[in-house]
Amino acid sequence: MSPRPARFLLLAGAVALLLGGALAAQTGPEPDVAAQVAQAVGTAEDGGLRLSAAVEIAVVLTLLSVLPALVITVTSFTRIVIVLSFVRRSMSVNELPPNPVLIALSLFLTMFVMGPVFGRIYEQGYLPYKEGRIGAEQAAAAGWGELRGFLVANTRASEVQLFAEMARLEAPADYTSAAATEALPFRVIVPAFVLSELKTSFQMGFLLFLPFLVIDLVVASVLISMGMFMLPPVMISTPFKILLFVLVDGWHLVCKSLVESFVTT
């Protein structure tokens, strides 16, 4: 992907800085626009653009405003929170654990899964930019390259092909190769990844439902054979499902399966 998002952020930050300087100097002499641009944008060792502190703050604030959407769409959060919700639903305890606990656990598992990816982004993108060895566009391209590798590695080929066809692009024959994925734009990779995550999470949720469904069927059959038609089977099956989940150390197995289901290298 070309670093167009990074250029848009740089342009927006520079424009905001120039407008702020123009408003502050309304009562004074006419500002030197060229000097303000030179102060806002510097040059790195490799000739790339380097932002000033004010523009960097503007870029960071812009990223913070879209941080929730980024966490949901380009990390492992979607699969984790859906599978954990399936666990709660399958045990017929719709309020335990509470939503804050479930979301907090999903966030920390997401940080654990994405740790190697974020570490490589920091080492190959932010650290060289901070030391002045590369420019802002090169840092953004390096960071997106690492994130793109994670997204493609955890996306089904059918989903990539679907969105590539809808975007009227030629789908790569081997979408796992770095050379092939470089031609795929952001608008193809991200929705393909989200759709693939939804499909995977629902498949894992179905497998989680099966053992608890067997317990529900057995309890309902026993109650019907005893003529206890007025007693809801859920009242009897719920304790047995919780007991089964505790005996097999269910939370340990679910969290381990979730973390190991992602490719981060």
Image: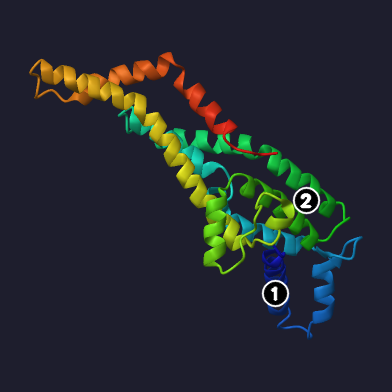
Badge nearest the viewer, 1 or 2 = 2
Amino acid at dot 2: Tyr
Relative height, residue 227 to residue 81 (above, below) = above
Question: Splitting the image into 4 quarters, where does residue 205 fall?
Answer: top left
> Is 203 on the left or on the right of 219, as rendered?
right
Direction front: furthest residue: 173
The residue identified by callout 2 is 126
- Residue at the (71%, 71%) spot, across then down: 11
- Badge 1 marks a residue whose secondary structure is helix
Viewport quadrant of the N terminus: bottom right
> At which x and y percent is residue 126?
78, 51
**C-alpha span from label 1 to label 2:** 23 Å
The answer to whether one can see residue 98 in this image is no
> At which x and y percent is residue 81?
47, 39
The answer to whether one can see residue 264 in this image is yes
The residue identified by callout 1 is 15
- Mark 1 or 2, nearer chain start: 1
Relative height, residue 105 to residue 247 (above, below) = below
Direction right: furthest residue: 45
> At which x and y percent is residue 23?
68, 78
- Residue at the (9%, 23%) spot, across then down: 229
